[in-house]
Every structure is written in structure tokens, then in C-alpha cells.
Amino acid sequence: MQTKETVFFADDLNNLLTTRLPINNSIIPLAIILKTMRYHLESNELSLKKLYSEVKSSELGTRIHISKLIKNNWISINTCSKDSRVKIIKPTAKMLDTFNTLSNELRTSRESKNKKILSFKSFIKR
């Protein structure tokens, strides 16, 4: 069951994300960004293969959005240190800074409305 705080948080998050992230009219870039951040926050590696299986879209559609995110400096693709055939997706400093700003804005928004604060890290790990 969703609480009021969770719904308010999701609404605030949606408003902030659509104005700060390059998601345009597609859920695919948002899914890529959120998966990348989740793996980063958990200190795990996100391979391209794993991303393709977790994003509910065609591989071609996902590739197109990955290319745009790389071109606009939101994510980077690195070679895995254990196996050079495996490509790992990492958030860039731009993405990390943006999420830090978003977390601060959400915290401020929740505090100013005197509502329970649900951190982005808690929300993304659900």
C-alpha cells in the first residue's frame, strides 16, 4: 500500500526529473539513468548485457538512447577490469552532480511542506 508521503515524493520526483534529465517523451532514457544510478549506489557493475535484459524495451531502442546519453555526457561505457569483452555503464560526474542536486531539492521540498522525507536512495532501492 502506498502512503501519502510516497505518492507526494513520486510526484515531486517526476516534476524534478522531467525538468532536469534528458528523458523527453520516452521512459527508456529514464530507465537507463535510474538503473545506472541504482547499480552505482549499490557499488555494483552494470554491464550492457544486464541493462538490455533489465530495461523493458527492444535492444535497438535501448542502444539509441544509450548513444544519446553518452553523447550528452550523462553516462560512460568502460571496459570491465576482469573481462575486456564486457562493457560497463557508469554515471558521469554530470549525472552524479544532477542527482545530488535533485536529492537536495527533494529534501528541501519535503521539509518546506512539513512532510516525511523519503530519500532518493531509499526510493530507488525499492
Image: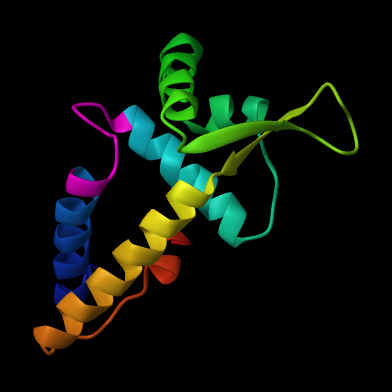
Q: Residue furthest top?
A: 60
Query: Is residue 71 rendered magenta in the image?
Result: no
Name the colouring of the figure: rainbow
Instruction: Name the image quarter holding the N terminus.
Output: bottom left
Residue 116, position as x, y percentages in the image: 22, 85
Give the overall secondary structure of the magenta segment: loop
Query: Quick one: quadrant of the C terminus?
Result: bottom left
Q: Is residue 98 left or right of residue 50?
A: left
Report the residue at 43% width, 46% height from top: 34
Q: Quadrant of residue 32?
A: top left
Picture coordinates of residue 61, whole percent (x, y): 41, 14
Residue 14 visible to an observer of this rendering? yes
Report the magenta residues as a range: 19-27
Nearer to the camera, 56 or 22 = 22
Query: Is 60 rendered above or below residue 122?
Result: above
Residue at 12% from the left image edge and 90% from the top image edge: 114
Q: Residue at x 19, y 52 (%)?
A: 14
Q: State left or right for residue 55 relative to residue 7.
A: right
Dividing the picture into quadrants, the one containing residue 12 is: bottom left
Quadrant in the rendering for residue 76:
top right
